[in-house]
Image (spheres, rainbow, N blue to C red):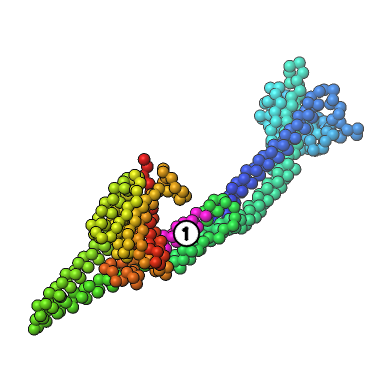
Amino acid sequence: MSIRLRLTILYSAVLALTLLGFSGLVYAIQAESTLSEHRARLAEMARAASMRQQWGDWRLDQAPPPPVIGPEGREVGSFRPKEWDVYLQHLIPGGEVVRRSENIGDFDFPVSDEGLASAQAGVPWEGIVRVDGDPYLTRWEPIVIDGEVTEILMFARSLADREQYLATLRRILLTGGGIATVAAFGVGWFFAGTTLRPIHRVTQTARAIGVERDFGRRVEYSGPNDEIGQLATTFNAMLAELQAAYQQVERSLQQQRQFVADVSHELRTPLTTVRGNLALLRRQPAIQPEDRDDILADLAGESDRLIRLVNELLVLARAESGRVLHSEPVQIGSLIEDVCRQAELLEPDRPVICEPLLDVAVVGDQDALKQVLLILMDNALKHAAGPVTVTTRAVNPDGLPGHHQAQVVISIRDTGPGIAPDVLPYVFERFYRGDEARAESGIGLGLPIAKALVEAQHGTLSLESQPGQGTVATVVLPKAAV
């Protein structure tokens, strides 16, 4: 059963129960109201008749009808009340009818034992009796003189019109309630469909996304920000997250495929060289000793290259795998001094200038930061013949200088030939080397490793370069709190 049908049935059931309760209340009020009207009328007539001086009002100005002979041979008088829908019987305390109203004719209303007993005790009594299937409201009114019941008046009024009115009212209420319930079912079905249409669109969108794998689709909703509106908004937000995650997975897979292709390409050359050299060593007759020494030296060089390649690939893989690095305050001044000292040992003839360093600390991993600075320093020494300058400064998030700011900037500047504008966007790609760098002994993984390590420590790495004016590598790291 669909939620639309369940809601419609629920609406209709609530309305039907409400109408049923309302109809029952109206019917009960009308039934009691009409019965109270009859009772009030009989009580009024009974009070008037109980006053002996008003007995003459029960006769018309016509001649009295012939006497009626009772069962015991006694004369039973007859009289007519002014209202012909009210019947009256006059009884003696023993219960014998001595007079009756003219509209009764020769019919005797049945005597109620309960009503007679109550009247004999001097207490008025009311009750409903049925005569030939028709209901009558009866009232027994005793006439008490000097503390003794001398006469009993029994009034009766037909309730047939009341029952007919109540039956008609009952049919109207039931028929109207049924028609209203059916109409409400149709209206509820329509409005439930209109209200649930956004949910249907959510379902269709989810189904289409599952079939087409198109996370760019969104649920179209222009209604109020109610529960359904919030559902549509939440669903669209979830789709945006899924789209971002899906695109990230796609990029990761693409990078993985590219990484495998690049690694395969880079490993193929030294492995091919090693295999060729081994084939030369196995030749018969044996090659000359000097050639053999050259081949062994070539094999050792290619083995070292393979080892460096594998080590750098491992470092890059660890940096990009999301491995959590140590996060602790690192004194940047002493760290840069160590890097400059190592650079001077590698290139004794190259001036390395460390400008006055800030006595500040950054948040990061000391070993990873040292490796980043060594990579950048090594690149600067390889591609430039002049001095290499290292500077530091503190900046706030807006880039304004200050002493107690949120970031520390480390810059390594060389005076080399610079990087061409068309090459600069690709320097952080794996295994990429510009035309000027191809003559060097690198494999194109230094800058990608440095960038991955810096970003793993919530920092940024960027290069600025112009041909003929050198290159500036800038590392921005979060400043440690004092």
| Camera-side residue of 279 and 154 | 279
Q: Where is residue 162 in the image (x, y as percent from the top left)?
A: 73, 41
Q: Position of 442 compared to 235: left or right?
A: left
Of the residues shown, which amino acid type is indicated by label 1? Answer: Leu
- For image coordinates 34% across by 54% down, the residue present is 390
Indicate the secondary structure of the residue bearing disc 1. helix
Q: Is residue 189 visible?
A: no
Picture quadrant where residue 343 is located: bottom left
Graded by Cα atoms within 10 Å as few (under 14), some (14 to 19) or many (20 or more), the crowding at tag 1 reads many
Residue 378: horizontal and vertical position, in percent? 29, 61
Q: Give the range drawn in magenta.
A: 233-251
The total of numbered circles placed on residues is 1
- Residue at position x 75%, y 35% in the image: 37
Chief secondary structure of the magenta portion: helix
Q: In this view, does 369 lie above or below 201?
A: above
Q: Write the residue at 21% across / 73% down.
A: 271
What residue does disc 1 label? 239
Quick one: 197 or 132, which is closer to the camera?
197
Instruction: Check if residue 250 falls in the magenta segment.
Output: yes
Task: Name the quarter where the C terminus is drawn.
Answer: top left
Task: Name the residue nearer the viewer: 433 or 383.
Answer: 383
Q: In this view, does 421 lie to the left or right of 226?
A: left
Which quadrant would residue 315 be assigned to in this image?
A: bottom left
Would you say 437 lies left or right of 194 here? left
Q: Nearer the viewer, residue 296 or 259?
A: 296
